[in-house]
Image (tube, coloured by chain):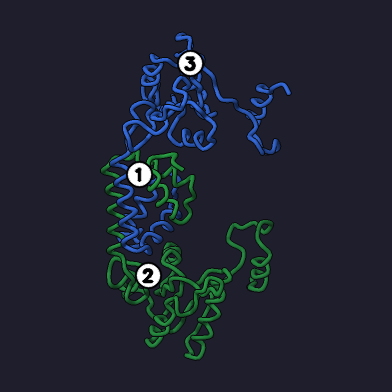
Chain colours: A blue, B green
Amino acid sequence: MDLYSGHINKLIEELSALPGIGSKSAQRLAFHLINMSQEKVNRLANVMIEAKANVRYCKECYTLTDKEICPVCANAKRNHKLIMVVENTRDLAAYEKTGRYEGIYHVLHGAISPMLGIGPGDIKLKELMERLQEDVEEVIIATNSSLEGETTAMYISKLIKPTGIRVTRIASGVPVGGDLEYIDEVTLLRALEGRVEL
Amino acid sequence: MDLYSGHINKLIEELSALPGIGSKSAQRLAFHLINMSQEKVNRLANVMIEAKANVRYCKECYTLTDKEICPVCANAKRNHKLIMVVENTRDLAAYEKTGRYEGIYHVLHGAISPMLGIGPGDIKLKELMERLQEDVEEVIIATNSSLEGETTAMYISKLIKPTGIRVTRIASGVPVGGDLEYIDEVTLLRALEGRVEL
């Protein structure tokens, strides 16, 4: 539809290809960008290009970082014998925000999903197994509590078990502050199964 | 917080300054951009810069367009004696999508809001009055049905009335398909006041 000018249409089209941005949001964003100063638009555009050009995988844990080795892996105070496996860099950041985890990470960049055709070879699993050649005491699997996350967790645990390294899984249950009434049945059952002594 | 690298942090910061994008969405977008090919990121960045640089106000109706005169104003088949006043280009597009409006538009780029300190001089109102010097039969006020939109509508109608030009306001009432149960009282009362003979 030729509601807007060619430039605006093209911008809306590009923006609506981004995740979580529908056609209405894309329109609103496009007009916001057009109303911004040329200087600000250029800055945003450059930040995007620069980030894409300069961000790479940490050579050890495969998180996204500016440097060869990410700050967590480079920190000698962290416990390098404890590796938490997460699906992506945002999950790593979520645990880092707690400020209480002392170990290091391994970022898979995905989860096994037969539905989407993502197999063990498509995520950083071989890289994880290579890391286990070194002195590792425990691997904590912190993939999401989704079908894909659980499948990946099972797969990894089976792979690691024979090495004799301890493999654990973060607990699933009712979120803190969660109201039982609004929580799905599977979570409620998990919370029941995982109940602990008081 | 230094959860991510400098480049990622800067990108997240820039993205979360955009409207409707919270910190979580900004994170998700940033990682999506970083996972896109450099070529695609460059294209998106360029489309933004180009759109900003090339889009301007239509010399007649002040909508955002690539050309001096927008396609609606340039269309001789439209009724140039009928002007619909809207708050922004998206509202114009919403009416254009109906494909049933035959007149032309005037885009105010805002609405009067004493709360936000936006007065009549801050929107394209002087420009509207200038257009009324020409042969205009009716001005349809289609500002939003919000406090600001209503205030603007009242203000404009008082301004135009003395010229003898017909001033109308789009109807407000229950949206088509709307369930009375979920509609606010003000709308319900408006719908009652605006009832029509069957």
> Residue, x 52% and y 79% (percent of image)?
B168
Q: In this view, does A111 lie to the left or right of A68?
A: right
Instruction: Characterize the local packing of mark 2: few (<14), some (14-19) or many (20 or more) Cα atoms within 10 angstroms.
Output: many
Q: Is residue A87 above or below residue B172?
A: above
Residue at the image point whose x is 39% and y is 17% from the top: A129
Residue annotated with mark 3: A137
User: Depth-wise, is mark 2 or mark 3 nearer the camera?
Assistant: 3
Could you say which is closer to the camera, residue B45 or residue A64? A64
Of the numbered discs in the image, which one, if any, rests on residue B63? Answer: 2
Q: Nearer the viewer, residue B69 or A163?
A: A163
Q: In which quarter of the image is the C terminus of chain B?
A: bottom right
Q: Nearer the viewer, residue A108 or B163?
A: A108
Residue assigned mark 1: B7
Q: Which amino acid type is shown beneath numbered disc 2?
A: Thr
Dot in front, 2 or 1? 1
- Identify the amino acid type marked 3: Glu
Q: Distance between the residues labelled 2 and 1?
A: 36 Å
Residue B185 in picture, x, y percent from top left: 68, 65
Q: Nearer the viewer, residue B129 or B196?
A: B129
Q: In which quarter of the image is residue B102?
A: bottom left
Q: For mark 3, does the 10 Å Cα neighbourhood hold few (<14), some (14 to 19), or many (20 or more) residues? A: some
Q: Position of residue A167 (x, y in %)?
A: 51, 16
Is residue B171 left or right of B86 when viewed as pictured? right
**Mark 3 — on which chain does it sit?**
A
Pointer 2 with pointer 1, Cβ within 8 A: no
Q: In which quarter of the image is residue B79?
A: bottom left
Vertical comparison of A38 with A17: above or below: below
